[in-house]
Amino acid sequence: MRTPLIAGNWKMNGSTELVEAFGQAFSSAALPNSLEAAIFPPYPYLGAARAAFAESPLALGAQTLNPHPAGAHTGEVSGPMLREFGVQYALVGHSERRQLYRESDEQVHERLLAALEVDIVPVLCVGESLAERDAGHTLQVVLHQVGYVMSRLEPAQRERVIIAYEPVWAIGTGRTATPEQAQEVMAGIRAYLAEFDRGLADGLRLLYGGSMNAGNAAELLAQPDIDGGLVGGASLKVDDFLAICQSAG
Ligand code: PEP
């Protein structure tokens, strides 16, 4: 039985006020028992979020991390620092980082190792562009991104990874993959993981991301290989994020 995870990626959005609003709403909200929920705010809000979420079921995530533990890397934040702030999850390889900041598979792999090093659960983001989907290369692209990282990990490390399938054409566009489209790719990822180990494939959590909202979450989350969601825009609205969490029970 895989525990569902709903992860809210605020990207470069949010405020102290929003952190407080989430803390208040989630401290008294009824959430499904077997659900993990986490907010991934920008770094400056981690301290405030840790305090505001203390009485709530919300965990904390980071949107990326530097591969090095410390040193001359101006502007960067390391795994041990995030750990000190109670961060439990970190995104690695989000498509915006791959595209806007030219993060390669190799860098994604290094960041993922840095997260594991400090017991932060890495959420490996993968997904195809619209051109790649139109050319019929979806599974090939996605399995390359998954395989590059997973094949370089020890078996015990692989088990600690979460994979988020996020078709790039569905991120922030309001255009969601249909439940069938998402399920097809995620079943493909799970089948690929079974080539490493059947137990790994059965146990690893796969999240869907790409314009998930309160209206479409239930149908997506009902798919057999979708174990949760990575939510961008809709995670900035307390009521919407709460509704998505409630539909994951
Ligand atoms: C994301 O940023 O990971 C994402 C899925 O964004 P959105 O929900 O806005 O498409």
Image (tube, grey):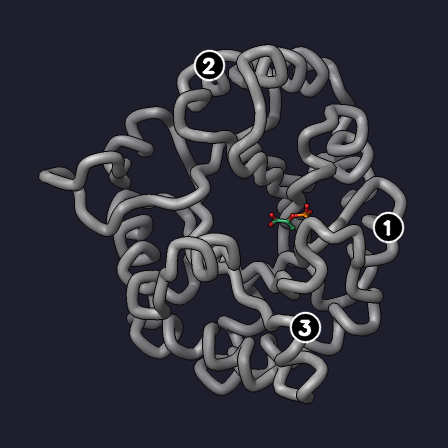
- Answer with left or right where residue 109 lies relative to residue 167: left
Q: Residue 116's spot in the image, x, y percent?
A: 31, 52
Q: Which amino acid does label 3 sit on?
A: Leu
- The answer to the question of whether label 1 and label 3 lie on touching residues, with beta carbons closer than 8 A, is no
Q: Residue 106's spot in the image, x, y percent?
A: 30, 69
Callout 1: SS: loop
Q: Name the residue under label 1.
A: 216
Q: Compared to 155, does 144 lie above or below?
A: below
Residue at 52% x, 34% y: name it. 12
Gap in angstroms between the C-alphas marked 3 and 2: 38 Å
Gap in angstroms between the C-alphas marked 1 and 3: 21 Å
Number of other residues with Cα within 10 Å of mark 2, as a class: few under 14, some 14 to 19, many 20 or more: some
Q: Residue 242's spot in the image, x, y percent?
A: 76, 30
- Answer with left or right where residue 160 lies relative to residue 246: left
Q: Quadrant of the C terminus?
A: top right
Gap in angstroms between the C-alphas marked 1 and 2: 31 Å
Comparing 119 with 52, the one in front is: 52
Q: What residue type is labelled 1?
A: Asn
- The label number, if any, that marks residue 181 in the structure image: none
Q: Name the residue under label 2.
A: 48
- The mark closer to the camera, 3 or 2, is 3
Q: Earlier in the sequence, mark 3 or mark 2?
A: 2
Residue at 47% x, 60% y: name it. 99
Q: Residue 105's spot in the image, x, y percent?
A: 36, 69
Number of other residues with Cα within 10 Å of mark 3, as a class: few under 14, some 14 to 19, many 20 or more: some
- Answer with left or right where residue 75 lies relative to residue 21: left
Q: Name the residue under label 3.
A: 130
Q: Which amino acid does label 2 sit on?
A: Ala
Number of other residues with Cα within 10 Å of mark 1, as a class: few under 14, some 14 to 19, many 20 or more: some
Q: Quadrant of the N terminus?
A: bottom right
